[in-house]
Image (cartoon, grey):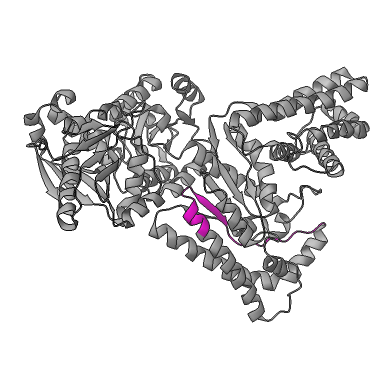
């Protein structure tokens, strides 16, 4: 039965296509020799089956069964995508394939004497494929690891993700042999991903899982079931450890739902009954292990392993419902479980693609953070929304601001989760929202591509989006908005131990005390007003996440445009021939945190500075001078203690953004020789009389 209203002309079109099915499939199969179509190098017989499957999915979509459109798009993209191609090349490939497919179907309809049906088909088909062929705002590199469940989920994921203005390359890997899977992961060592999905306990990915699900162990002793579960845990543990080491992006791991499937409801129910005891025992063991296993590396490094809870879907929908087939064929056997899991994937890809990396959320107030208009009287707070924003501010380093058309005297947060103190540079007036956003942008010195704007009124969202096309504009009335906001908070929880809201508020006081910023930063007497304290110390293990973040976020004072990984920072931290030196700055207005990084390597005949980074908020305060002097001091100490004499060498690689630091080495007495800057001990470094320097080994 159709799950959506379908125009009669479209139903007639589907019926006509059924009558010329063999003709269409034969024409589709003629593309067998084309490698762009036959990615898997199928035999003619298998390729015909693929073509037949595409036909079936498309016709059922035209008949009103919406999810078959998602399955069609998913299968086509999976069949066509070449991982060695660029996004642009793959897009060209898709366009060519879809144009060819559309032509074949339309010509078949026309030959049946119905040009109007050909036009009906073209309209419906173009509407279906349009999201996949539009230029996406962001491309998310996603890795999918598991058995056939991942392919089923992908089929339901690609179309909805495209409608969000995102694109992904469907890259599932599913060797069942753990050794082969580790080998495949090793071959990906030169690739980076934005997100990884891992389904370790589904269907028959491991023989032990299959044994627990097929009902053959119904009466097996508890020790036998425990041994099977332990074997699953041991194999999965090794793979998760591998993923933890190789990938620093968010990694989402399914828990053990252990949903059984059957070709009929009766068969599925029978399998459920037969495997109930073994499944329950094994799932308890596996899921308890998974919770502990995910918690440990997150605590030791940073939050990057997360659980997708199939068990929660079971509570909400029931095992029998989740195991129900939506489509069965040689190439797809999608179930309700794979359809619902796809929604989980889409939300996470949406959060990764659109929110991760943002720095500021600008909020409307009326009917956004509370229900009602505060100028008209009491309002009821959206405590859940405010709690989401509070979590982002307090635990993820995200800054909040306000753009509201209101009388400032009326605005308060009494009875709410947030308060006005949680916001910086609030803009509350009757002027245009776009002007408010522009003032916030200027005042905080942030680019709109790093901002999110929330407003319940569609016309306000449209006006702001028109003015700032790279600003992410979201509807707070859409539940998906808060779903992805909460996922964003989950993925970035603890990513920053800095209270950036407080830092912006303190910076406003600092600027007010100094007056003209450009003048203040060239006048030592003025800078003395700050009471600067620059502390120089070796990075601790707990500093490495912040160090990685500062290096990767810094552009203007990043001498080599360095980008790094947490693993690389760990290597430098553990190395006896390298040091990570941090510059921490505070003044009478507050603590600015760790704002400078120099990575120093000690070699037999020289000392080198491969990485030197400074936060833009301390430009002009002399921090780079103090940090360079500390590098030299340590080089001298190292040389005296270990007979390592030689110059200090600094690297500088110019790019489009790091012009402000181009003269740093030259200004401190380094001479340019053979494209590197060398310091041989003279002249002495400039004094910084306006700051107190503290040195810690």
The part of the image, by quadrant, that contains residue 618 is top left
Residue 202 position within the rendered picture, expressed as x and y whole percent measured from the top left: 66, 59
Quadrant showing the C terminus: bottom left
The part of the image, by quadrant, that contains residue 309 is bottom right
Where 235 sits versus 438, above or below?
below
Residue 191 falls left or right of residue 8:
left
Relative depth, front residue between 466 and 152: 152
Residue 562 position within the rendered picture, expressed as x and y whole percent measured from the top left: 36, 38
Residue 464 position within the rendered picture, expressed as x and y whole percent measured from the top left: 44, 22
Which residue range is magenta in the image?
A: 242-263
**Residue plotted at (52% across, 49% down):** 189
Any part of residue 416 in sight:
no
Residue 355 falls left or right of residue 273:
left
**Residue plotted at (78% across, 61% down):** 268
Relative depth, front residue between 511 and 571: 571
- Tell how many labels: 0
The part of the image, by quadrant, that contains residue 211 is bottom right
**Residue plotted at (54% across, 64% down):** 237
Relative depth, front residue between 410 and 277: 277
Quadrant showing the N terminus: top right
Please say whether residue 345 is one of the residues in the magenta stretch.
no
């Amino acid at each position: 039965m159709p799950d959506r209203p379908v125009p009669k002309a479209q139903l007639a079109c589907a019926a006509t296509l059924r009558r010329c099915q063999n003709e269409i499939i034969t024409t589709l199969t003629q593309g067998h020799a084309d490698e762009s179509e036959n990615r898997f190098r199928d035999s003619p017989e298998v390729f015909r089956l693929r073509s037949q499957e595409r036909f079936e999915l498309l016709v059922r979509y035209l008949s009103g069964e919406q999810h078959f459109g998602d399955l069609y798009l998913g299968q086509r993209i999976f069949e066509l995508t070449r991982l060695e191609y660029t996004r642009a090349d793959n897009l060209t490939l898709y366009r060519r394939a879809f144009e060819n497919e559309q032509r074949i179907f339309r010509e078949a309809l026309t030959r049946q004497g119905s040009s109007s049906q050909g036009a009906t088909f073209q309209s419906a088909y173009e509407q279906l494929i349009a999201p996949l062929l539009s230029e996406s705002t962001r491309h998310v590199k996603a890795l999918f690891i598991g058995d056939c469940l991942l392919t089923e989920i992908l089929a339901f994921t690609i179309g909805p993700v495209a409608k969000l203005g995102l694109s992904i390359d469907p890259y599932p890997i599913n060797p069942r042999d753990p050794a082969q899977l580790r080998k495949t992961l090793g071959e990906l060592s030169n690739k980076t991903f934005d997100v990884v999905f891992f389904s370790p306990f589904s269907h028959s990915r491991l023989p032990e899982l299959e044994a627990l699900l097929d009902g053959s162990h119904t009466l097996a002793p508890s020790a036998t079931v425990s041994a099977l579960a332990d074997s699953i845990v041991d194999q999965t543990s090794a793979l998760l450890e591998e993923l933890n080491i190789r990938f620093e992006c968010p990694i989402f791991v399914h828990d053990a739902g252990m949903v059984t499937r059957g070709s009929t409801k009766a068969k599925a129910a029978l399998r459920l009954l037969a495997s109930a005891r073994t499944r329950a025992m094994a799932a308890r063991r596996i899921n308890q292990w998974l919770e502990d296993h995910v918690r440990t590396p997150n605590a030791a490094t940073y939050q990057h392993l997360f659980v997708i809870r199939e068990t929660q879907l079971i509570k909400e929908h029931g095992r029998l419902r989740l195991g129900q087939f939506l489509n069965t064929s040689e190439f797809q056997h999608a179930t309700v479980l794979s359809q619902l899991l796809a929604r989980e994937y889409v939300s996470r890809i949406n959060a990764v693609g659109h929110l991760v990396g943002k720095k500021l959320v600008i909020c409307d107030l009326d009917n956004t953070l509370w229900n009602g208009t505060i100028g008209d009287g009491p309002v009821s707070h959206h405590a859940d929304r405010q709690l989401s924003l509070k979590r982002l501010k307090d635990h993820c380093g995200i800054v909040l601001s306000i753009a509201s058309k209101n009388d400032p005297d009326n605005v308060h947060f009494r009875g709410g989760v947030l308060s006005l103190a949680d916001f910086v540079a609030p803009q509350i007036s009757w002027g245009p929202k776009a002007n408010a956003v522009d003032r916030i942008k200027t005042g905080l010195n942030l680019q709109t591509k790093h901002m999110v704007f929330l407003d319940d009124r569609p016309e306000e969202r449209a006006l702001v989006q028109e003015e700032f096309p790279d600003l992410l504009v979201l509807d707070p009335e859409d539940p998906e908005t808060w779903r992805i906001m909460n996922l964003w908070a989950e993925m970035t929880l603890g990513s920053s131990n800095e209270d950036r809201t407080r830092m912006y508020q303190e910076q406003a006081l600092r600027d007010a005390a100094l007056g003209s910023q450009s003048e203040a930063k060239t006048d030592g007497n003025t800078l003395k007003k700050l009471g600067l304290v620059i502390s120089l110390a070796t990075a601790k293990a707990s500093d490495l996440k912040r160090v990685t973040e500062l290096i990767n976020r810094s552009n203007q004072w990043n001498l080599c445009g360095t980008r790094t990984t947490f693993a690389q920072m760990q290597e430098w931290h553990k190395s006896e021939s390298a040091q990570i030196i941090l510059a921490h700055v505070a003044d009478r207005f507050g603590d600015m945190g760790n704002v400078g990084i120099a990575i120093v390597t000690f070699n037999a005949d020289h000392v080198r500075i491969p990485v030197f980074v400074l936060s833009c908020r301390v430009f002009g305060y002399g921090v780079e001078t103090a940090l360079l002097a500390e590098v030299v001091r340590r080089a001298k100490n190292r040389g005296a203690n270990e007979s390592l004499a030689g110059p200090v060498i600094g690297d500088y690689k110019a790019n489009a953004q790091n012009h402000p630091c181009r003269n740093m080495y030259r200004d401190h007495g380094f001479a340019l020789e053979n494209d590197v800057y060398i310091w041989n001990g003279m002249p002495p470094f400039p004094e910084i009389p306006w700051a107190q320097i503290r040195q810690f080994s």
